[in-house]
Amino acid sequence: NAGVTQTPKFQVLKTGQSMTLQCAQDMNHEYMSWYRQDPGMGLRLIHYSVGAGITDQGEVPNGYNVSRSTTEDFPLRLLSAAPSQTSVYFCASSIYGQTSYGYTFGSGTRLTVV
Amino acid sequence: AQKITQTQPGMFVQEKEAVTLDCTYDTSDPSYGLFWYKQPSSGEMIFLIYQGSYDQQNATEGRYSLNFQKARKSANLVISASQLGDSAMYFCAMRGLISSGSARQLTFGSGTQLTVLP
C-alpha cells in the first residue's frame, strides 16, 4: 500500500547506544519530517527535509541526526541514546508547497531508553 | 513563531450528540493553514480537515466541520452525531505559508482526548 513506512515499530535501547529509525515513502513527496510525541505535549518537530540533499532543524533537534540522499528515504539517527529520548516517533511526508495537503504519517516507532 | 493552544485535555460526549473541540492559535504569518488530526488508541495519525486562512467559508468534511473565527484566532472542530468510533485524541495544528524555515512546518497543540459514551 502506498504511504509512509516506519521501522521498527518498537525498540528498547540502553543508555549510550545508537540506532537509526527508518522512514520510507512511495508517494514522491518532496517534504519529509520527523516528530516526537510525548504525553501532554502533542507532536514536536525534530528535523525536516524539503528535498533530497536538503535538511534542517526543527524545534527539538539535539541528540538526533538526519540525512536525505533520496526522495524516498529519511532516516533518523540517535547518536547516543538517553532516557529523555524515550518517546513515540512519527515520520510524516507531504507535497511541498501545496498548502491544503494534509501530511501523511507513518504508524510510529515506540522507543524506550533504559 | 506559531503556537497552538488546546485547553480541553479531556471531553465526554453522549453518542449521537454534537461536540466542539476548542483550538486557538497565534502566528505572525499573514497566510496560514489550520489542520485537525485524529489519533485513535492504535496510534496512527489521521488527517481530518483543513482550513486556509483566506478561505471565505468554513471547511466541512462529512460529520466534521471547522468553525473558523479569524478575528478571534480560533479554529474549533465540530463533530456532529458522535459515534463510539470517534473516541480518540484530537490534535489541532497549523502551518505558516509565507514565513521560511521551521515556521512553515506543522505545529501541533497538546491534544484533546474525546470519549464518546454509549
Image (cartoon, rainbow, N blue to C red):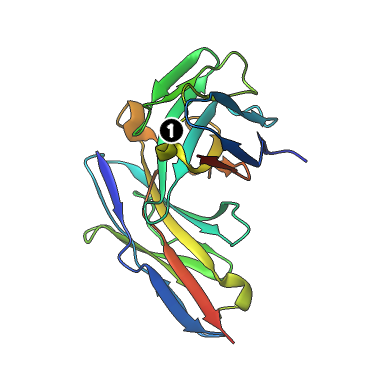
- In this view, the residue in front, B60 or B106, is B106
| Residue B91 figure quarter | bottom left
Residue position marked by numbered label 1 in the rendering? A82
Q: Which residue is pictured at 56% across the width and 85% down the height?
A: B15
Is residue A84 something one can see in this rendering? yes
Q: Which residue is nearer to you in this view: A37 or B11?
A: A37
Give SS at disc 1: loop
Query: In the image, residue A93 lies at what x, y percent?
Result: 56, 34
Q: Is residue A22 above or below residue A55?
A: below
B30 left or right, relative to B106: left
Above or below, comparing residue A2 to residue B5 in the picture? above
The picture places residue A57, in percent across and down from the top left corner, at: 38, 25
Residue at the farthest right position: A1
Residue B66's place in the image compared with A82, above or below, is: below
Residue A28 shown left or right of residue A67 in the figure: right
Q: To which chain does the residue with label 1 belong?
A: A
